């Protein structure tokens, strides 16, 4: 893989986000939504605790709505406008194009996450929080965002319609979030599914691996899980796009 080609695609896609007002609307929506859920819904000040547990709690649900919206046009728009043929005739491989697009979208979400730093400053001002736990929470959130972005890239590759890409990404992310919840596990267990299979499916939950990190626990198993999701989804997007190109 030629890193120069990946960098060129990354710069092209990253610049495209800020060439339209959509990026700024997204950033504002992300910050407003996270701030409202943290301070308005979970009553951050009323808790009188200098920790960001309620802040990180909402990240998966915010990503569920906004990440599919940020990624739905990565491939669908290329296919709709016909520029995908031009892109694939350039001296770059499909894998390089996929990785460049993925990294651009992930970096964009990373900027949105970084702009939440005033909440950290507020927490530091209010008390003496565990900065290690905060770091773990941000790392987990960033990895979770990367997994959702990879899912969005895959969903966008399935159709030329951005709406369909959004819905598919939303459905996959929602499924991977809720399969680790106790009500879902209990319901599946009630169907007579063996406990080993239920536990194996539950271990694939995006939420389960994020919960440990937002509480300040870094486990290489959790990091490896998110990296695995990214690699798998990008590989699936590569297969889908390659098959469509061949046909």
Image: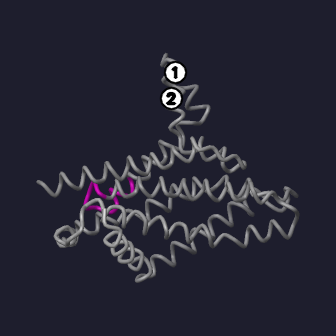
Q: Which residue position holds label 2?
A: 200
Residue 129: x and y in percent read: 83, 59
Is label 1 in a helix, a strand or a loop? Answer: helix
Task: Answer with the quarter of the image where residue 154 lies.
Answer: bottom left
Residue 197: x and y in percent read: 48, 23
Task: Answer with the quarter of the image where residue 124 lies.
Answer: bottom right
Q: Which mark is residue 246?
A: none
Residue 23: x and y in percent read: 47, 76
Quarter holding the C terminus?
bottom left
Residue 26: x and y in percent read: 51, 72
Tell me if 190 is positioned left or right of 73 in this view. Answer: right
CA separation, marks 2 and 1? 6 Å
| Identity of the residue drawn at 69% across and 71% down | 117
Q: Is residue 175 magenta?
A: no
Q: Main secondary structure of the magenta part?
A: helix
Specify start and end residues of the magenta stretch as a single range: 157-167
Marks 2,1: beta carbons within 8 A:
yes
Quarter holding the N terminus?
bottom left
Task: Answer with the quarter of the image where residue 12 lies.
Answer: bottom left
Tell me if 66 is positioned left or right of 99 in this view. Answer: right
Tell me if 186 is positioned left or right of 132 in this view. Answer: left
Q: Residues within 10 Å of mark 2 (few under 14, many from 20)?
A: few
Q: How many numbered discs? A: 2
| Identity of the residue drawn at 29% across and 57% down | 157
Q: Residues within 10 Å of mark 1 (few under 14, many from 20)?
A: few
| Identity of the residue drawn at 43% across and 65% down | 103
Q: Which residue position holds label 1?
A: 196
Viewer-proximal residue among 223 and 59? 223
Viewer-proximal residue among 119 and 25? 119
């Amino acid at each position: 893989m030629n890193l120069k080609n990946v960098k060129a695609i990354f710069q092209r896609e990253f610049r495209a986000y800020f060439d339209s007002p959509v990026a700024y609307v997204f950033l504002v929506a992300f910050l407003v939504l996270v701030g409202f859920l943290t301070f308005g819904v979970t009553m951050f000040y009323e808790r009188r605790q200098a920790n960001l547990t309620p802040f990180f709690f909402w990240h998966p649900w915010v990503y569920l709505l906004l990440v599919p919206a940020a990624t739905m046009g990565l491939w669908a728009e290329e296919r709709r406008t016909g520029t995908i043929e031009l892109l694939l005739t350039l001296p770059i491989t499909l894998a390089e194009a996929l990785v460049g697009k993925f990294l651009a979208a992930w970096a964009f979400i990373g900027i949105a996450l970084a702009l939440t730093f005033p909440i950290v400053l507020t927490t530091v001002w209010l008390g003496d929080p565990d900065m290690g736990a905060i770091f773990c929470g941000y790392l987990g959130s960033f990895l979770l965002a990367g997994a959702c972005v990879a899912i969005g890239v895959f969903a966008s590759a399935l159709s030329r319609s951005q709406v369909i890409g959004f819905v598919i990404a939303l459905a996959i992310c929602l499924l991977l979030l809720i399969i680790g919840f106790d009500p879902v596990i209990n319901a599946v267990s009630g169907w007579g599914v063996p406990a080993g299979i239920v536990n194996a499916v539950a271990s694939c939950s995006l939420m389960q691996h994020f919960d440990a990190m937002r509480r300040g626990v870094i486990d290489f198993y959790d990091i490896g899980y998110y990296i695995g999701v990214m690699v798998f989804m990008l590989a699936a997007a590569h297969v889908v796009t390659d098959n469509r190109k061949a046909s």
